[in-house]
Image: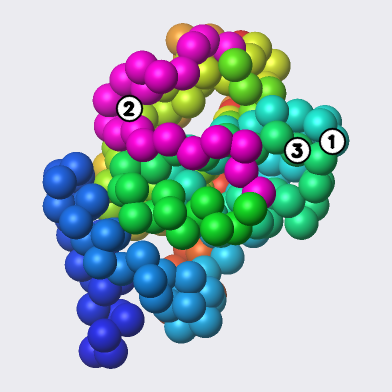
Amino acid sequence: MTDRNHMLERAIALDGDPDAIREFYSDWGKTYDTDLLEAFGYVGPAVAAEALTKRVGDTALVLDAGSGTGLVGIELFKRKNDLTIDGIDLTPEMLTHSRKKGVYRKLNIADMCGPLHEINDDIYDGTVSAGVFTNGHVGPQGLDELIRVTKSGGPVVITVRDSAWEADGFKDYIGDLEADEKVKVLEITLSPYHTKEGVTCQLVVLEVV
């Protein structure tokens, strides 16, 4: 197993511990973009950004939830460069890298496993999250806050690593959200994720009710 593969295996075994996640990504930040894009063929940011930008206006205010080093922000900017993009992430060092991308209005530290106290209700025209809803990271309950901060009628777009989709309860949770009329499911599609590793994800597009 290469060092890069070892990092990926460690990532999905973090068991949702915020301190462990923060420490892990603090160490990985310097080579994160190269490792994921070149070694793993990581297309989650592009897939998620494409789905979001098709459903928001050219000058929309959007949230990149779990912005990491800013890979989603770059993909959003490529598609609609008049968007206003805010980002949140658990790890300060990752936000330092995303800040260098130059595409975000503001970036704040936040733990998506709990309440996003810094963000009011119904702020964003759309919300996107790639690479966060996966094994060992944020569970399906994290969707509740993304729905809260997104305007009625706005899209919430997430990728869910396929190994977590049913095992971690995402499929059932999203079904319950729709049954409770909190969201309308617009799309759930099996999509490429790490193309060089043969890993897929579920691309989930919800409309806030």
Residue span colored magenta: 103-122
Q: Which mark is residue 141?
A: 2
- Residue at the location (48% across, 78% down)? 34
Looking at the image, tell me whether mark 1 or mark 3 is earlier in sequence order. 1
Q: Which mark is residue 58?
A: 1
Q: Which mark is residue 122?
A: none
Against 75, is 165 above or below? Answer: above
Q: What whole-number distance in Å separates the C-alpha atoms at marks 1 and 2?
A: 30 Å
x, y (%) of residue 112? Answer: 34, 33
The kind of secondary structure element at disc 3 is loop
Amino acid at pointer 3: Leu
Q: What whole-number distance in Å separates the C-alpha atoms at marks 1 and 3?
A: 6 Å
**Residue 114 included in the magenta stretch of the image:** yes
x, y (%) of residue 2? Answer: 28, 89
Q: Is the residue under label 3 in contact with that under label 1 (CB below 8 Å)?
A: yes
Amino acid at pointer 1: Asp
Seen from the viewer's position, the closer of residues 179 and 55 is 55
Against 200, is 114 above or below? Answer: above
Which tag is nearer the camera, tag 1 or tag 2? Answer: 1
Neighbourhood count class around disc 1 (C-alpha, 10 Å): few under 14, some 14–19, many 20 upward: some
Q: In which quarter of the image is the N terminus?
A: bottom left
Q: In which quarter of the image is the C terminus?
A: top right
Q: Mark 3 points at which residue?
A: 83
Against 107, is 143 above or below? Answer: above
Amino acid at pointer 2: Gln
- Examine the image and state in which quarter residue 114 appears: top left
